[in-house]
Image: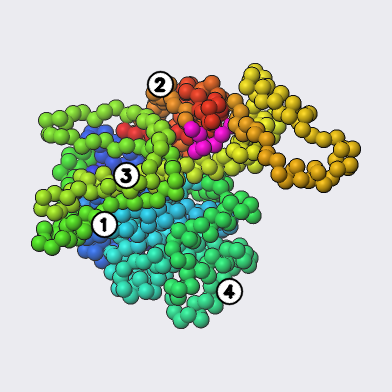
Amino acid sequence: MASKNRPYEQFGSFILFKRLESDALGDLWRAGRIDGAQLGRTVALRRLLGGKREAFAAAAGEARTLAPLLTGTTFAKEQTIDVLGGVPFIAHEYGGGRSLRHVVDRARGISGTVPNPVPLDQAIVIAEKVALSLATTADLRYMGNRLVHGALIPQFIWIADDGEIRVAGQQLGKAMIASLAEPKFHAEFGRYFAPEYQTLGEPTKSSEVYSMGAILYLLVTGNEPPEATTTSAFANTIHAAKTASAQPIPDDIRVLIHKSLNIDPAVRFASIADMKQAISALVHGGKYSATTFNLAFYLSNLLKKEMEGEALDREKEGKVNVAAYAETAAVTPVAPAPIAMTSPLADAPPKKSKMGLIAAAAAVVLIAGGGAAYYMLKSKPAAPKAAAQKRAPAPMKAQVSAPALISSTPVQAASVAATGTLDPAAQKKAFEQAVAQKLQEEMMKLQADYTKTLKQQQSKNAPVQTASLGAPQTSAANADENGPSAAQLDSRRLAARQETTTTPSLQQQQAAPAVTQTIAETAPAPVVPTVHEGDVIDFTALDTPPQAMASIKPEYPRLAMQQKATATVVVSALISESGQVLEVKILKGDARFGFNDAALRAMRAARFSPAVKDGKHVRTWRPQTFVFSL
């Protein structure tokens, strides 16, 4: 019951400020976490009140330990999946935004709003990020089993105000399928799950593709995917569909829908990774202007009134008397100890067979790097060795993860005790390593994409060209404000002398064409240096990458510290042949609270050792990640 001192409803260690959604699954709130006698970070909290409560409680118990480990750029930030007072729930960082369910409903004009369909450009960029999250999940193993989302619905896709797309609700698939027995639940969510998944109850690579196809259909048409009936009727419905603007669906997008949202598993993409590649080809093919910036602009127009009203609401919520709620929160903790987790491997007693050893072997984490990948991500703090070592929480810090060479050798993920059981600490560490390596590959892809963009946009006056190894060329980056280096001048003089002495005159070429041809075919090509002092070389091709001469310590933004906000910012810096930072660009940022500016300032002030290629000091674009955390 609301009162003057307690104007908001309380849910354990959360204060429920505003209900954002309500459906057959439950309700979604903007909530504040109670942190002692203070108000902690704001979260999006979804209580799973619908469906089969006991099935969701069991699934949430199994996902309790896993959810915090999913820390990638496509996973919901600071996700918690747990059970509180018998109510399963999902909570993750809020930071402004809405679920895909809410965005699509507003886009089609539900609740009396003016329709504003999701543009095709933005539909495919959302689909690409969601598919990337599913593909990343499928590449990970936990407790010896390959992960699969299994519960992809619009309610579990979060779109932030800045256009960032993240996915939540992993490992709740069994509960979703069990709840489809209820007619109301099935009517709202059954269309997002493959027919064979609903029948067998176990997700597969192909069933994930079907769910992704249903999301793509929703984004493109603005309508719910059709119910899976007969094959012919289903196919006819898909074929007759139009975009949300009542226009024919472009053929390239229609092909994706037909190869994913199909009753026959054999017709679908072989895996979600294959579908992700097909969507990425559309995003980067040049036909569509698919960017998160454009998505953020679209959302600002679509949800303008909501965002304006929310600013006033959050100012009021920030003044709430937390002390009135704190005593109750202390009695009902939110996160039970991980030992309560129910998992086949965790709960199984030791057996006389070799199943323990098999489980340990299955837990060996192998994510193929395709060669060397660079990038170090946020490291996990070590657990205290004893209760006596506990101390007050450390102040907020901005951590720096520098690029590091990652071996493609499989990571040994588990150790086996004398009883043959799996070491939980080793299992957790191995999973974190697997997630980190996958994210390192993803971050290096950001650098590769940026390098490709630089090559496409290079001009005579911009020092952004990347030297092509194996072919001589002169880069605009070689001619900076100090002029060419001595080594460059020597190389140019040598090349000029060779050209003067070896190139025949026009008359000589006309007089003896046969001889000239013979010489050209038999004489070895002259040895010409391929790398010059000051050339811009791709970071992955360096013999010696640039190393920071001192630790890089960005200042934690004051407002972010007050709000207890966290962020991860990825930048790329152009390092000169002398180790100076010439330019810094944001590859993956966070526009809130000045995080981007703090990362840029810290990187510009840094100094590095020169990068080396073939014995020459060269320039390079060096990626760097800054983790602002508690």
In x, y percent, where is residue 257?
52, 67
Q: Residues within 10 Å of mark 1 (few under 14, many from 20)?
A: some
Mark 1 or mark 2, whichever is nearer to me: 1
Q: Which residue is mark 3?
A: 433
Question: Cβ–Cβ below 8 Å for labels 4 and 1?
Answer: no
Q: Nearer the viewer, residue 291 or 538?
A: 538
Local SS, label 2: loop
Which mark is drawn over residue 254?
none
Question: Cβ–Cβ below 8 Å for labels 4 and 3?
Answer: no
Calculate the distance from the C-alpha at mark 4 to the C-alpha at mark 3: 46 Å
Q: Amino acid at mark 1?
A: Ala
Which of the two discs, 1 and 3, labels the residue nearer the N terminus? 1
Residue drawn 52% across the image and 76% down it: 235
Up-down: is 173 above or below 162? Answer: below
Q: Amino acid at mark 2?
A: Ala
Q: Which residues are magenta?
A: 536-543
Local SS, label 1: helix
Calculate the distance from the C-alpha at mark 4 to the C-alpha at mark 1: 46 Å
Which mark is drawn over residue 550?
2
**Majority secondary structure of magenta residues:** loop
Q: Which residue is mark 4?
A: 240
